[in-house]
Image (cartoon, rainbow, N blue to C red):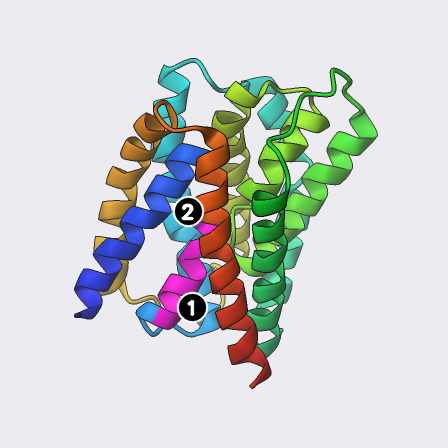
Amino acid sequence: MTAFVLALAAGAVVGLALGALGAGGSILTVPALIYLLGFGPAAATTAGLVIVIVTSLTALVAHARAGAVRWRAGGLFAAAGLLPAAGAGALSAQIPEAVLTLAFALLAALAAAKMLLRRMPHASGRVSGVRAATAGAGLGAVTGFLGVGGGFLAVPALVTVLAVPMGAAVGTSLLVIVANALVALTARAFTAVTLDWTLMTPFLATAVLGAWDGKRLAAKVSPAVLQRVFGAVLLAVAVAMGATALL
């Protein structure tokens, strides 16, 4: 199978995840770029941010048209993460690639555990400004350092911390992802990383199409089923990346 075909297939999966769950797609992007398309960890995390931004914007438009985005709550949550995202994005360029790979594997394992073992969260009904700022800052740091959108963390945080209903949390998380990823990408703008656009372009194309399909899929399939499927994929990714970093 050629790299071009692999890019098309991987992009479709990423788009489906972001469109259906508002999560999971971005954390699949970096491993796909590394293991399927031959990107180095530093280039993969930067390219991942570009792909996440474009795909999340597409999915955000689809959710916004359905009235499933809480703009104020998402904006406040994202604002708390902007500075941490910028700082972590600059710091990541100084970290050895093996360390980045291992950190990413640990994060993927955490995300998989949350998706496989936990039920979909329920709104708490209370909004704590301190907790919201802390959660937003932590998410921003993760986004900047590892080049992921952090939707798998944003969705439960929006529900439990900002009391966003589950039906709107997916769309709102996409707003948070776009804001954090834009800042993290800006912080990497002056790093010496070369991106292979001949592979990123087909990846982006099918990711955008997949995001629209993912929104429609979310309306037909139980969120719990989607969550478990992507959790299983993430677990496999975590094991593969962890083994690579340690061996």
Which stretch is magenta?
A: 25-35
- Residue at 32% from the left image edge and 69% from the top image edge: 36
Quarter-of-image position of residue 163:
top right
Query: What label does residue 52 carry, if any?
Result: 2
- Residue at 58% from the left image edge and 54% from the top image edge: 144
Question: How far is disc 2 from disc 1 in space, using C-alphas?
Answer: 14 Å
Left or right: 241 in relation to 125: left
Is residue 22 something one can see in this rendering?
Answer: no
- Residue at 37% from the left image edge and 22% from the top image edge: 219
Residue flagged by tag 1: what amino acid is it? Ala
Q: Position of residue 65 (x, y in %)?
A: 36, 16
Q: Quadrant of the N terminus?
A: bottom left
Q: Earlier in the sequence, mark 2 or mark 1?
A: 1
Left or right: 2 in relation to 239: left
Query: What label does residue 138 carry, if any?
Result: none
**Could you say which is closer to the camera, residue 106 or residue 227?**
227
Question: Is residue 34 a member of the stretch shown in magenta?
Answer: yes
Q: Position of residue 64 (x, y in %)?
A: 41, 19
Quarter-of-image position of residue 109:
bottom right
2 and 1 marks in contact (CB < 8 Å): no
